Image: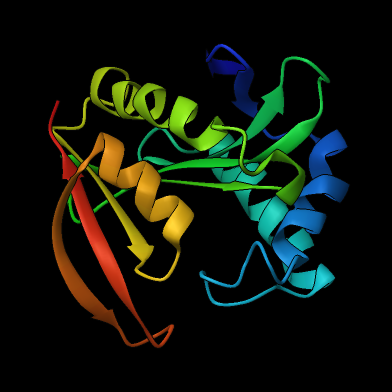
Amino acid sequence: MLIFETDRLKIRNLIEDDLLAFVELQTDPVVMRYVGGPQSSEEAISDFRSCTEANQNSADDLWFIWAAESKETDRFIGTVACVQGRDRNEIEIGFRLLPASWNQGIASELTPYLLQYALSELRAKQVMASVDADNEASVKVLDKWMNFVELVPNHEEGCLDRIYLYEG
């Protein structure tokens, strides 16, 4: 099911054909270096199954992980997330892209559409994002589209996270 589109992307539900690329994404040490490190293939497969199941049953939980697909190639290039934040009025957004899609402005193109979707379709009053302060590329994207609020220790991942908010 198509969720929304940007100029170059289709954001849609994950499908079985995405499994191998999803595993590639989740097991890539470079992609995952700022989010706790790479998963094993088994963990990635389990996460894929959890995501597809949650997307089907998510009306009450507000927990969505979707596929980002290139319109040009019709291939999976990453994931997009909208998950419930601290309460039902807040949605946390996120994205991960395969390295072949880096440095092309895709995250910058995607973010305003994701913010609008969270506010209009999911009826969030506030959108939140957090990013490892060392993840310069994602920091640059979030600085462009959201308001930096604070720097907080992330004890679980041993880093400092930048917290962003957006209220439309």
Q: How many marks?
A: 0
Camera-nearest residue between 165 and 140: 140
**Residue 58 appears in the rendering:** yes
Q: Position of residue 71 (x, y in %)?
A: 72, 15
On screen, 41 above or below 7?
below
Q: Quadrant of residue 105?
A: top right
81 lies left or right of 9: left
Camera-nearest residue between 45 and 32: 32
- Residue drawn at x 65%, y 34% as measured from the top left: 67
Please identify the quadrant where the C terminus is shown: top left
Q: Position of residue 89 (x, y in %)?
A: 15, 39
**85 is higher (above) or lower (below) than 57:** below
The quarter in which the N terminus is drawn is: top right
Q: Nearer the viewer, residue 102 or 77?
A: 102
**Position of residue 145 measured from the top left corner of the image (x, y, whole percent):** 27, 35
* Near-viewer residue (86 or 113): 113
Residue drawn at point x = 51 percent, y = 70 percent: 34
Which picture quadrant has residue 72? Answer: top right
Q: Is residue 92 above or below residue 107?
A: below
- The structure residue drawn at horizontal position 45% and vertical position 32%, both measured from the top left corner, is 108
Looking at the image, which residue is at 40% across and 85% down? 156
Judging from the image, the colouring scheme is rainbow
Q: Measured from the top left, where is residue 63 in percent x and y? A: 43, 44
User: Image check: 79 left or right of 19?
Assistant: left
Relative placement, left or right, of 27 versus 151 is: right
Regarding residue 93, the answer to whether it shows in the image is no
Q: Is residue 163 left or right of residue 23?
A: left
